[in-house]
Amino acid sequence: MQISKVHLEGQNKLLNDFVNGKEAISSFFGANPLLKEEMEYRIKYVMGRSYNRTGLVNALEKFHHKHEASDQAKENVKKLVNKDTFVVIGGQQAGLLTGPLYSIHKIISIIHLAKKYEMEHGVTVVPVFWIAGEDHDIDEINHIHTIENNEVKKQTFYQRNPFSNAASRTEIDQQEMKKWIEKIVKTFEETNFTNELLEELNATIEKSSTYVDFFAKIIFKLFKSEGLVLIDADDPLVRELESSLFDEMIQKQDIVRSVLKDTKSKLIQSGYHETLQISEQSIHLFFHSKEGRQLLEVSDNEGYFQTKNKSYQFSKDELLEIANEQPELLSNNVVTRPVMQEFLFPTLAFVGGPGEIAYWSELKDVFKVFNLEMPPVFLRHMFTIFERNIVAALDDFSLDVNDAVQTSLVDKKEAWIKDQVNLDYKQEFNTAKRALAELHKPLQDITGKITPNLRDFSKKNFIKIEDQILLLERKIEESILKQHEEQIEKWNRVISSITPNGKPQERVLNIYYFINKYGFDFVHELCELELSWDHAHQIVKI
Protein backbone atom coordinates (compact mmCIF):
# COMPACT_ATOMS: atom_id res chain seq x y z
CA MET A 1 0.00 0.00 0.00
CA GLN A 2 1.04 3.57 -0.72
CA ILE A 3 -0.47 6.62 0.90
CA SER A 4 -0.59 10.24 -0.15
CA LYS A 5 -2.94 13.12 0.56
CA VAL A 6 -4.99 15.81 -1.12
CA HIS A 7 -6.76 18.78 0.43
CA LEU A 8 -10.45 18.94 -0.45
CA GLU A 9 -12.74 21.88 0.07
CA GLY A 10 -16.02 20.72 1.54
CA GLN A 11 -19.45 22.15 0.83
CA ASN A 12 -20.30 22.67 4.49
CA LYS A 13 -19.37 26.09 5.92
CA LEU A 14 -19.33 24.86 9.53
CA LEU A 15 -17.03 21.94 8.74
CA ASN A 16 -14.71 24.08 6.60
CA ASP A 17 -14.41 26.66 9.37
CA PHE A 18 -13.85 23.92 11.96
CA VAL A 19 -11.03 22.37 9.93
CA ASN A 20 -9.45 25.79 9.32
CA GLY A 21 -9.66 26.75 13.00
CA LYS A 22 -11.95 29.77 12.50
CA GLU A 23 -12.70 31.44 15.82
CA ALA A 24 -16.36 31.84 14.84
CA ILE A 25 -16.88 28.08 15.21
CA SER A 26 -13.96 26.96 17.38
CA SER A 27 -15.48 28.91 20.29
CA PHE A 28 -18.30 26.35 20.28
CA PHE A 29 -15.84 23.51 20.96
CA GLY A 30 -13.35 22.53 23.65
CA ALA A 31 -9.57 22.20 23.42
CA ASN A 32 -7.81 21.66 20.10
CA PRO A 33 -6.93 17.92 19.85
CA LEU A 34 -3.81 18.66 17.78
CA LEU A 35 -2.23 21.37 19.98
CA LYS A 36 0.23 19.81 22.43
CA GLU A 37 -0.13 22.47 25.13
CA GLU A 38 -3.92 22.24 25.09
CA MET A 39 -3.75 18.46 25.31
CA GLU A 40 -1.41 18.72 28.30
CA TYR A 41 -4.09 20.77 30.03
CA ARG A 42 -6.66 18.14 29.07
CA ILE A 43 -4.53 15.36 30.59
CA LYS A 44 -4.35 17.27 33.88
CA TYR A 45 -8.11 17.87 33.81
CA VAL A 46 -8.90 14.18 33.29
CA MET A 47 -6.38 13.17 35.98
CA GLY A 48 -8.22 15.46 38.40
CA ARG A 49 -11.58 13.80 37.84
CA SER A 50 -12.87 10.61 39.40
CA TYR A 51 -14.36 7.71 37.47
CA ASN A 52 -15.89 4.38 38.41
CA ARG A 53 -12.99 2.60 36.74
CA THR A 54 -13.55 -0.67 38.58
CA GLY A 55 -17.21 -0.87 37.55
CA LEU A 56 -16.36 0.08 33.97
CA VAL A 57 -13.60 -2.53 33.68
CA ASN A 58 -15.89 -5.19 35.17
CA ALA A 59 -18.58 -4.48 32.55
CA LEU A 60 -16.07 -4.35 29.69
CA GLU A 61 -14.33 -7.57 30.72
CA LYS A 62 -17.61 -9.48 30.57
CA PHE A 63 -18.42 -8.03 27.16
CA HIS A 64 -14.96 -8.80 25.77
CA HIS A 65 -15.04 -12.35 27.09
CA LYS A 66 -18.50 -12.92 25.58
CA HIS A 67 -17.35 -11.80 22.14
CA GLU A 68 -13.96 -13.51 22.13
CA ALA A 69 -11.88 -10.35 21.98
CA SER A 70 -8.14 -10.62 21.36
CA ASP A 71 -5.64 -10.74 24.21
CA GLN A 72 -4.47 -7.24 23.24
CA ALA A 73 -8.00 -5.86 23.64
CA LYS A 74 -8.50 -7.63 26.97
CA GLU A 75 -5.18 -6.27 28.21
CA ASN A 76 -6.22 -2.75 27.27
CA VAL A 77 -9.45 -3.19 29.23
CA LYS A 78 -7.42 -4.07 32.32
CA LYS A 79 -5.28 -0.95 31.89
CA LEU A 80 -8.37 1.23 32.34
CA VAL A 81 -8.40 0.52 36.06
CA ASN A 82 -5.25 2.63 36.42
CA LYS A 83 -5.61 6.35 37.09
CA ASP A 84 -2.95 7.23 34.51
CA THR A 85 -4.75 5.46 31.63
CA PHE A 86 -6.81 7.51 29.19
CA VAL A 87 -8.93 6.82 26.11
CA VAL A 88 -9.59 8.17 22.64
CA ILE A 89 -13.18 7.35 21.80
CA GLY A 90 -15.71 7.44 18.96
CA GLY A 91 -18.68 5.39 17.92
CA GLN A 92 -21.16 4.26 15.33
CA GLN A 93 -24.21 2.10 14.81
CA ALA A 94 -23.86 -1.68 14.55
CA GLY A 95 -24.07 -1.94 10.77
CA LEU A 96 -24.19 -5.34 9.09
CA LEU A 97 -20.71 -6.44 8.00
CA THR A 98 -19.58 -3.14 9.68
CA GLY A 99 -21.67 -0.98 7.31
CA PRO A 100 -20.07 1.62 5.00
CA LEU A 101 -16.29 2.06 4.95
CA TYR A 102 -16.43 5.19 7.09
CA SER A 103 -16.99 3.06 10.22
CA ILE A 104 -13.64 1.36 9.56
CA HIS A 105 -12.02 4.71 8.83
CA LYS A 106 -13.31 6.10 12.11
CA ILE A 107 -11.85 3.19 14.08
CA ILE A 108 -8.49 3.61 12.32
CA SER A 109 -8.59 7.30 13.25
CA ILE A 110 -9.24 6.43 16.90
CA ILE A 111 -6.35 3.97 16.95
CA HIS A 112 -3.93 6.42 15.31
CA LEU A 113 -4.86 9.32 17.58
CA ALA A 114 -4.42 7.14 20.67
CA LYS A 115 -0.91 6.16 19.47
CA LYS A 116 -0.10 9.80 18.72
CA TYR A 117 -0.97 10.88 22.27
CA GLU A 118 1.01 8.01 23.77
CA MET A 119 4.11 9.04 21.83
CA GLU A 120 3.75 12.78 22.41
CA HIS A 121 2.74 12.77 26.07
CA GLY A 122 4.20 9.53 27.43
CA VAL A 123 0.89 8.28 28.82
CA THR A 124 -1.18 5.14 28.29
CA VAL A 125 -4.04 5.73 25.85
CA VAL A 126 -6.56 3.05 24.93
CA PRO A 127 -8.60 3.21 21.68
CA VAL A 128 -12.31 2.73 22.42
CA PHE A 129 -15.21 2.29 20.03
CA TRP A 130 -18.71 3.00 21.35
CA ILE A 131 -21.33 0.77 19.69
CA ALA A 132 -24.68 2.56 19.61
CA GLY A 133 -26.48 -0.62 20.63
CA GLU A 134 -29.47 1.29 21.96
CA ASP A 135 -30.21 2.67 18.49
CA HIS A 136 -33.54 1.32 17.23
CA ASP A 137 -33.51 2.41 13.57
CA ILE A 138 -32.77 -1.03 12.14
CA ASP A 139 -33.44 0.19 8.60
CA GLU A 140 -30.24 2.24 8.83
CA ILE A 141 -28.05 -0.78 9.57
CA ASN A 142 -29.72 -3.76 7.86
CA HIS A 143 -28.02 -3.39 4.47
CA ILE A 144 -24.80 -2.82 2.60
CA HIS A 145 -24.04 -1.83 -1.00
CA THR A 146 -22.25 -4.00 -3.54
CA ILE A 147 -21.04 -3.43 -7.10
CA GLU A 148 -22.49 -5.65 -9.84
CA ASN A 149 -21.65 -4.99 -13.49
CA ASN A 150 -20.34 -1.60 -12.46
CA GLU A 151 -23.68 -0.69 -10.87
CA VAL A 152 -24.30 -0.06 -7.18
CA LYS A 153 -26.85 -2.42 -5.64
CA LYS A 154 -28.40 -2.06 -2.20
CA GLN A 155 -28.43 -5.44 -0.46
CA THR A 156 -30.97 -5.41 2.38
CA PHE A 157 -31.39 -8.11 5.00
CA TYR A 158 -35.16 -8.36 5.33
CA GLN A 159 -36.43 -9.61 8.64
CA ARG A 160 -39.75 -8.58 10.11
CA ASN A 161 -39.50 -6.99 13.54
CA PRO A 162 -42.86 -6.29 15.18
CA PHE A 163 -41.40 -3.56 17.41
CA SER A 164 -38.74 -0.89 17.02
CA ASN A 165 -36.24 -2.43 19.41
CA ALA A 166 -32.63 -1.49 20.08
CA ALA A 167 -29.99 -3.13 17.88
CA SER A 168 -28.61 -4.95 20.91
CA ARG A 169 -32.06 -6.43 21.58
CA THR A 170 -33.06 -7.26 18.00
CA GLU A 171 -32.47 -10.93 17.34
CA ILE A 172 -31.15 -12.11 13.98
CA ASP A 173 -32.50 -15.14 12.16
CA GLN A 174 -29.19 -16.96 11.75
CA GLN A 175 -30.22 -19.14 8.82
CA GLU A 176 -31.65 -16.22 6.87
CA MET A 177 -28.53 -14.19 7.65
CA LYS A 178 -26.34 -16.96 6.26
CA LYS A 179 -28.34 -16.87 3.02
CA TRP A 180 -27.95 -13.10 2.87
CA ILE A 181 -24.18 -13.33 3.43
CA GLU A 182 -23.86 -15.96 0.70
CA LYS A 183 -25.73 -13.61 -1.65
CA ILE A 184 -23.31 -10.80 -0.76
CA VAL A 185 -20.18 -12.90 -1.25
CA LYS A 186 -21.46 -14.08 -4.65
CA THR A 187 -21.29 -10.47 -5.84
CA PHE A 188 -17.55 -10.49 -5.14
CA GLU A 189 -14.89 -11.76 -7.50
CA GLU A 190 -13.89 -15.28 -6.44
CA THR A 191 -10.38 -15.25 -4.96
CA ASN A 192 -8.14 -17.40 -2.80
CA PHE A 193 -9.77 -15.80 0.25
CA THR A 194 -13.45 -16.20 -0.70
CA ASN A 195 -14.18 -19.64 0.78
CA GLU A 196 -12.41 -18.85 4.05
CA LEU A 197 -14.20 -15.51 4.28
CA LEU A 198 -17.59 -17.17 3.84
CA GLU A 199 -16.77 -19.87 6.39
CA GLU A 200 -15.62 -17.30 8.93
CA LEU A 201 -18.71 -15.13 8.55
CA ASN A 202 -21.01 -18.15 8.86
CA ALA A 203 -19.16 -19.28 11.99
CA THR A 204 -19.51 -15.77 13.45
CA ILE A 205 -23.24 -15.72 12.75
CA GLU A 206 -23.68 -19.03 14.58
CA LYS A 207 -22.28 -17.35 17.72
CA SER A 208 -24.33 -14.16 17.32
CA SER A 209 -27.87 -13.57 18.52
CA THR A 210 -28.28 -9.85 17.78
CA TYR A 211 -27.02 -7.13 15.46
CA VAL A 212 -24.61 -5.95 18.15
CA ASP A 213 -23.28 -9.48 18.74
CA PHE A 214 -22.51 -9.88 15.04
CA PHE A 215 -20.96 -6.43 14.73
CA ALA A 216 -18.80 -6.75 17.86
CA LYS A 217 -17.41 -10.16 16.91
CA ILE A 218 -16.50 -8.94 13.42
CA ILE A 219 -14.80 -5.77 14.69
CA PHE A 220 -12.81 -7.71 17.28
CA LYS A 221 -11.52 -10.01 14.53
CA LEU A 222 -10.71 -7.24 12.06
CA PHE A 223 -8.78 -5.24 14.68
CA LYS A 224 -7.40 -8.13 16.72
CA SER A 225 -3.83 -6.79 16.60
CA GLU A 226 -4.70 -3.19 17.50
CA GLY A 227 -6.11 -3.76 20.98
CA LEU A 228 -9.35 -1.95 20.20
CA VAL A 229 -11.78 -1.86 23.13
CA LEU A 230 -15.53 -2.00 22.43
CA ILE A 231 -18.46 -0.96 24.57
CA ASP A 232 -22.12 -1.63 23.90
CA ALA A 233 -24.02 1.46 25.02
CA ASP A 234 -27.04 -0.77 25.77
CA ASP A 235 -25.17 -3.21 28.02
CA PRO A 236 -27.19 -3.62 31.26
CA LEU A 237 -23.96 -3.53 33.30
CA VAL A 238 -23.10 -0.20 31.70
CA ARG A 239 -26.60 1.07 32.43
CA GLU A 240 -26.00 0.42 36.14
CA LEU A 241 -22.94 2.69 35.98
CA GLU A 242 -25.03 5.38 34.31
CA SER A 243 -27.81 5.39 36.89
CA SER A 244 -26.65 8.43 38.89
CA LEU A 245 -26.17 10.57 35.78
CA PHE A 246 -29.61 9.56 34.47
CA ASP A 247 -30.94 10.88 37.79
CA GLU A 248 -29.08 14.16 37.33
CA MET A 249 -30.21 14.45 33.70
CA ILE A 250 -33.84 14.16 34.79
CA GLN A 251 -33.32 16.72 37.55
CA LYS A 252 -31.69 19.19 35.15
CA GLN A 253 -33.69 18.50 31.98
CA ASP A 254 -35.17 22.01 31.97
CA ILE A 255 -31.70 23.59 32.16
CA VAL A 256 -30.43 21.36 29.34
CA ARG A 257 -33.35 22.36 27.13
CA SER A 258 -32.73 26.04 27.90
CA VAL A 259 -28.96 26.07 27.21
CA LEU A 260 -29.43 24.03 24.05
CA LYS A 261 -31.92 26.60 22.77
CA ASP A 262 -29.51 29.44 23.60
CA THR A 263 -26.62 27.72 21.81
CA LYS A 264 -28.73 27.17 18.69
CA SER A 265 -29.48 30.91 18.64
CA LYS A 266 -25.78 31.79 19.02
CA LEU A 267 -24.84 29.43 16.17
CA ILE A 268 -27.39 31.04 13.87
CA GLN A 269 -26.16 34.51 14.85
CA SER A 270 -22.62 33.38 13.98
CA GLY A 271 -23.76 32.45 10.46
CA TYR A 272 -24.30 28.70 10.86
CA HIS A 273 -27.33 26.45 10.67
CA GLU A 274 -28.61 24.39 13.56
CA THR A 275 -28.15 20.64 13.07
CA LEU A 276 -30.24 19.03 15.80
CA GLN A 277 -33.88 19.10 14.74
CA ILE A 278 -35.33 17.95 18.05
CA SER A 279 -38.51 19.13 19.76
CA GLU A 280 -37.89 21.70 22.48
CA GLN A 281 -40.14 19.54 24.69
CA SER A 282 -37.68 16.63 24.54
CA ILE A 283 -35.74 15.83 27.73
CA HIS A 284 -33.14 14.01 25.59
CA LEU A 285 -33.68 10.58 27.11
CA PHE A 286 -35.41 7.49 25.73
CA PHE A 287 -37.70 5.07 27.55
CA HIS A 288 -37.53 1.40 26.54
CA SER A 289 -40.70 -0.67 26.68
CA LYS A 290 -41.80 -3.93 25.09
CA GLU A 291 -42.99 -1.85 22.11
CA GLY A 292 -39.50 -0.44 21.55
CA ARG A 293 -37.69 2.83 22.31
CA GLN A 294 -39.53 6.17 22.62
CA LEU A 295 -38.20 9.66 23.22
CA LEU A 296 -39.35 11.25 26.49
CA GLU A 297 -40.88 14.72 26.43
CA VAL A 298 -42.28 17.21 28.91
CA SER A 299 -46.00 16.55 29.14
CA ASP A 300 -48.69 19.18 28.72
CA ASN A 301 -49.63 18.26 32.28
CA GLU A 302 -47.17 20.20 34.40
CA GLY A 303 -44.71 18.05 36.35
CA TYR A 304 -45.16 14.97 34.15
CA PHE A 305 -43.18 13.34 31.36
CA GLN A 306 -44.49 11.19 28.55
CA THR A 307 -43.20 9.15 25.63
CA LYS A 308 -43.50 10.83 22.26
CA ASN A 309 -46.28 8.42 21.23
CA LYS A 310 -48.05 9.25 24.55
CA SER A 311 -48.30 5.55 25.49
CA TYR A 312 -46.47 6.08 28.79
CA GLN A 313 -46.59 8.91 31.31
CA PHE A 314 -44.46 9.40 34.42
CA SER A 315 -44.23 11.84 37.27
CA LYS A 316 -40.78 13.21 38.00
CA ASP A 317 -40.49 10.95 41.04
CA GLU A 318 -41.50 7.90 39.00
CA LEU A 319 -38.90 8.67 36.36
CA LEU A 320 -36.23 9.17 39.01
CA GLU A 321 -37.16 5.82 40.51
CA ILE A 322 -36.65 4.18 37.11
CA ALA A 323 -33.27 5.90 36.78
CA ASN A 324 -32.13 4.55 40.12
CA GLU A 325 -33.73 1.10 40.15
CA GLN A 326 -34.21 0.18 36.47
CA PRO A 327 -31.67 2.22 34.50
CA GLU A 328 -31.76 -0.36 31.69
CA LEU A 329 -35.15 1.14 30.75
CA LEU A 330 -33.50 4.45 29.85
CA SER A 331 -30.99 5.53 27.22
CA ASN A 332 -29.49 8.71 25.82
CA ASN A 333 -30.18 10.60 22.62
CA VAL A 334 -27.60 12.54 20.59
CA VAL A 335 -27.60 15.43 23.09
CA THR A 336 -26.99 13.46 26.29
CA ARG A 337 -24.95 10.54 24.91
CA PRO A 338 -21.74 12.63 24.63
CA VAL A 339 -22.20 13.71 28.24
CA MET A 340 -22.69 10.11 29.38
CA GLN A 341 -19.60 9.08 27.42
CA GLU A 342 -17.57 11.79 29.15
CA PHE A 343 -18.97 10.69 32.53
CA LEU A 344 -17.90 7.06 32.01
CA PHE A 345 -14.51 7.35 30.30
CA PRO A 346 -11.27 9.25 31.04
CA THR A 347 -11.39 10.79 27.59
CA LEU A 348 -8.52 12.66 25.97
CA ALA A 349 -10.38 13.20 22.68
CA PHE A 350 -13.54 12.30 20.83
CA VAL A 351 -13.29 11.26 17.16
CA GLY A 352 -16.31 12.07 15.00
CA GLY A 353 -17.43 12.28 11.41
CA PRO A 354 -18.65 15.42 9.63
CA GLY A 355 -22.24 15.00 10.85
CA GLU A 356 -21.15 14.53 14.46
CA ILE A 357 -18.89 17.59 14.32
CA ALA A 358 -21.92 19.63 13.25
CA TYR A 359 -24.19 18.57 16.10
CA TRP A 360 -21.43 18.62 18.73
CA SER A 361 -21.16 22.35 18.00
CA GLU A 362 -24.43 22.70 19.93
CA LEU A 363 -23.32 20.79 23.03
CA LYS A 364 -20.53 22.69 24.79
CA ASP A 365 -22.81 24.33 27.35
CA VAL A 366 -24.72 21.05 27.87
CA PHE A 367 -21.49 19.56 29.28
CA LYS A 368 -21.19 22.51 31.64
CA VAL A 369 -24.66 21.81 33.07
CA PHE A 370 -23.15 18.62 34.52
CA ASN A 371 -19.88 20.28 35.62
CA LEU A 372 -17.97 18.64 32.77
CA GLU A 373 -15.75 20.02 30.03
CA MET A 374 -16.38 19.12 26.42
CA PRO A 375 -13.52 16.86 25.28
CA PRO A 376 -11.34 17.89 22.33
CA VAL A 377 -13.11 16.90 19.11
CA PHE A 378 -11.12 15.43 16.21
CA LEU A 379 -12.55 15.07 12.71
CA ARG A 380 -11.89 11.48 11.64
CA HIS A 381 -9.58 10.72 8.74
CA MET A 382 -11.26 10.31 5.37
CA PHE A 383 -9.93 7.82 2.83
CA THR A 384 -10.36 6.84 -0.78
CA ILE A 385 -8.89 3.47 -1.74
CA PHE A 386 -7.58 3.11 -5.29
CA GLU A 387 -7.08 -0.37 -6.68
CA ARG A 388 -4.33 -0.90 -9.24
CA ASN A 389 -6.73 -1.43 -12.16
CA ILE A 390 -8.54 1.81 -11.27
CA VAL A 391 -5.28 3.78 -11.25
CA ALA A 392 -4.39 2.26 -14.64
CA ALA A 393 -7.80 3.21 -16.04
CA LEU A 394 -7.36 6.78 -14.81
CA ASP A 395 -3.98 6.90 -16.56
CA ASP A 396 -5.69 5.86 -19.80
CA PHE A 397 -7.92 8.92 -19.51
CA SER A 398 -5.01 11.21 -18.53
CA LEU A 399 -6.35 11.60 -14.99
CA ASP A 400 -4.59 11.06 -11.67
CA VAL A 401 -5.98 10.09 -8.27
CA ASN A 402 -6.23 13.71 -7.16
CA ASP A 403 -8.41 14.51 -10.17
CA ALA A 404 -10.63 11.55 -9.30
CA VAL A 405 -11.55 12.86 -5.84
CA GLN A 406 -11.65 16.57 -6.67
CA THR A 407 -13.76 16.62 -9.84
CA SER A 408 -16.95 15.01 -11.10
CA LEU A 409 -16.01 11.77 -12.82
CA VAL A 410 -19.43 11.66 -14.46
CA ASP A 411 -18.77 15.06 -16.06
CA LYS A 412 -15.31 13.88 -17.12
CA LYS A 413 -16.85 10.81 -18.74
CA GLU A 414 -19.43 12.88 -20.64
CA ALA A 415 -16.73 15.28 -21.83
CA TRP A 416 -14.61 12.31 -22.99
CA ILE A 417 -17.53 10.83 -24.96
CA LYS A 418 -18.15 14.20 -26.60
CA ASP A 419 -14.48 14.41 -27.56
CA GLN A 420 -14.76 11.12 -29.43
CA VAL A 421 -17.19 12.68 -31.94
CA ASN A 422 -15.86 15.29 -34.32
CA LEU A 423 -19.26 16.88 -34.94
CA ASP A 424 -21.42 18.34 -32.18
CA TYR A 425 -24.41 16.30 -33.34
CA LYS A 426 -26.57 17.22 -30.35
CA GLN A 427 -26.41 20.89 -31.31
CA GLU A 428 -27.40 20.02 -34.89
CA PHE A 429 -30.35 17.96 -33.65
CA ASN A 430 -31.48 20.73 -31.30
CA THR A 431 -31.33 23.18 -34.20
CA ALA A 432 -33.34 20.79 -36.38
CA LYS A 433 -35.99 20.30 -33.66
CA ARG A 434 -36.43 24.06 -33.26
CA ALA A 435 -36.70 24.49 -37.03
CA LEU A 436 -39.24 21.68 -37.26
CA ALA A 437 -41.36 23.30 -34.56
CA GLU A 438 -41.32 26.58 -36.48
CA LEU A 439 -42.20 24.88 -39.79
CA HIS A 440 -45.01 22.81 -38.31
CA LYS A 441 -46.64 25.62 -36.32
CA PRO A 442 -48.29 27.25 -39.40
CA LEU A 443 -49.61 23.83 -40.44
CA GLN A 444 -51.21 23.37 -37.02
CA ASP A 445 -52.69 26.87 -37.20
CA ILE A 446 -54.18 26.43 -40.70
CA THR A 447 -55.56 23.00 -39.73
CA GLY A 448 -57.26 24.56 -36.72
CA LYS A 449 -58.86 27.27 -38.84
CA ILE A 450 -60.05 25.06 -41.69
CA THR A 451 -61.03 21.94 -39.71
CA PRO A 452 -61.04 22.68 -35.94
CA ASN A 453 -61.87 19.06 -35.17
CA LEU A 454 -58.40 18.07 -36.53
CA ARG A 455 -56.49 20.47 -34.27
CA ASP A 456 -55.50 17.68 -31.83
CA PHE A 457 -54.62 15.40 -34.75
CA SER A 458 -52.21 18.06 -36.12
CA LYS A 459 -50.45 18.23 -32.75
CA LYS A 460 -50.10 14.45 -32.65
CA ASN A 461 -48.75 14.60 -36.20
CA PHE A 462 -46.00 16.95 -35.01
CA ILE A 463 -45.17 14.69 -32.04
CA LYS A 464 -44.81 11.68 -34.38
CA ILE A 465 -42.42 13.56 -36.65
CA GLU A 466 -40.44 14.80 -33.62
CA ASP A 467 -40.30 11.24 -32.26
CA GLN A 468 -38.64 10.09 -35.48
CA ILE A 469 -35.94 12.72 -35.06
CA LEU A 470 -35.45 11.68 -31.43
CA LEU A 471 -35.20 8.05 -32.56
CA LEU A 472 -32.46 8.96 -35.02
CA GLU A 473 -30.61 10.85 -32.28
CA ARG A 474 -30.84 7.84 -29.94
CA LYS A 475 -29.56 5.54 -32.69
CA ILE A 476 -26.52 7.79 -33.15
CA GLU A 477 -25.91 7.74 -29.37
CA GLU A 478 -26.19 3.95 -29.29
CA SER A 479 -23.76 3.68 -32.17
CA ILE A 480 -21.22 5.93 -30.43
CA LEU A 481 -21.54 3.93 -27.21
CA LYS A 482 -21.11 0.68 -29.14
CA GLN A 483 -17.97 1.97 -30.87
CA HIS A 484 -16.42 2.90 -27.52
CA GLU A 485 -18.03 0.19 -25.40
CA GLU A 486 -14.79 -1.06 -23.84
CA GLN A 487 -13.63 2.42 -22.82
CA ILE A 488 -17.05 3.40 -21.50
CA GLU A 489 -17.11 0.24 -19.37
CA LYS A 490 -13.75 1.34 -18.01
CA TRP A 491 -15.22 4.74 -17.13
CA ASN A 492 -18.14 3.02 -15.38
CA ARG A 493 -15.74 0.83 -13.41
CA VAL A 494 -13.80 3.88 -12.22
CA ILE A 495 -16.95 5.78 -11.28
CA SER A 496 -18.51 2.86 -9.36
CA SER A 497 -15.27 2.38 -7.44
CA ILE A 498 -14.43 5.99 -6.55
CA THR A 499 -17.78 7.82 -6.49
CA PRO A 500 -20.49 5.14 -6.42
CA ASN A 501 -23.95 6.65 -6.80
CA GLY A 502 -22.28 10.05 -6.94
CA LYS A 503 -21.14 9.77 -3.32
CA PRO A 504 -17.70 9.41 -1.72
CA GLN A 505 -16.49 5.81 -1.78
CA GLU A 506 -16.42 5.58 2.02
CA ARG A 507 -20.14 6.33 2.30
CA VAL A 508 -21.20 3.42 0.06
CA LEU A 509 -18.73 0.55 -0.28
CA ASN A 510 -18.11 -2.11 2.35
CA ILE A 511 -14.78 -3.35 3.75
CA TYR A 512 -15.48 -6.99 2.85
CA TYR A 513 -15.16 -6.27 -0.86
CA PHE A 514 -11.50 -5.45 -0.19
CA ILE A 515 -10.94 -8.24 2.35
CA ASN A 516 -12.25 -10.80 -0.13
CA LYS A 517 -9.86 -9.50 -2.79
CA TYR A 518 -6.74 -8.68 -0.77
CA GLY A 519 -6.89 -10.90 2.31
CA PHE A 520 -7.69 -10.85 6.00
CA ASP A 521 -4.77 -8.57 6.88
CA PHE A 522 -6.14 -5.75 4.74
CA VAL A 523 -7.52 -3.77 7.71
CA HIS A 524 -4.34 -4.25 9.71
CA GLU A 525 -2.32 -2.95 6.74
CA LEU A 526 -4.54 0.14 6.64
CA CYS A 527 -3.83 0.64 10.35
CA GLU A 528 -0.10 0.51 9.68
CA LEU A 529 -0.16 3.40 7.20
CA GLU A 530 1.34 6.72 8.25
CA LEU A 531 -1.51 9.23 8.16
CA SER A 532 -1.26 13.01 7.91
CA TRP A 533 -2.64 15.23 10.68
CA ASP A 534 -3.69 18.28 8.67
CA HIS A 535 -7.26 17.16 7.87
CA ALA A 536 -6.19 16.17 4.36
CA HIS A 537 -8.03 13.45 2.45
CA GLN A 538 -6.02 10.22 2.58
CA ILE A 539 -5.32 8.57 -0.79
CA VAL A 540 -4.49 4.85 -0.51
CA LYS A 541 -3.16 2.95 -3.54
CA ILE A 542 -3.15 -0.85 -3.37
Image: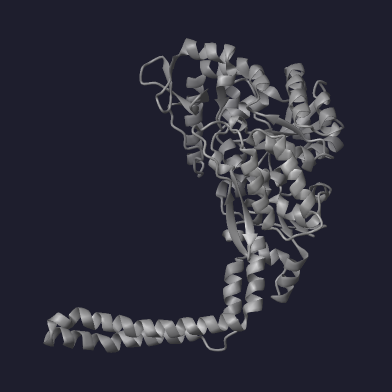
Q: Position of residue 487 (x, y in %)?
A: 66, 77
Looking at the image, residue 536 lies above or below residue 350: below
Q: Is residue 469 above or below residue 272?
A: below
- Left or right of 29 in this view: 262: left
* Residue 32 visible, this orientation: no
Residue at image coords 47%, 20%: 254
Q: Quadrant of the N terminus?
A: bottom right
Q: Quadrant of residue 223?
A: top right
- Residue at image location 68% in from the left, 20% down from the top: 237
The reply, left or right, for residue 539 in relation to residue 525 is: left
Res. 84 visible in picture: yes
Residue 127 in percent (x, y) is at 77, 35
Q: How many marks?
A: 0
Q: In the image, is 479 to the left or to the right of 177?
A: left
Image location of residue 252, percent across then percent down: 52, 18
Picture residue at 82% right of the left edge, 29% below the top:
74
Looking at the picture, tell me which residue is in the foreground, 311 or 432. 311
Q: Nearer the viewer, residue 220 or 266?
A: 220
Is residue 528 rendered to the left or right of residue 476? right
Color style of the picture: one colour
Residue placed furthest toward the front: 175
Asked which quadrant contains residue 118, the reply is top right
The answer to which of 287 and 170 lies nearer the viewer is 170
Q: Quadrant of the C terminus?
A: bottom right
In this rendering, the answer to whether 255 lies above or below 358 is above
Residue 183 in percent (x, y) is at 64, 53
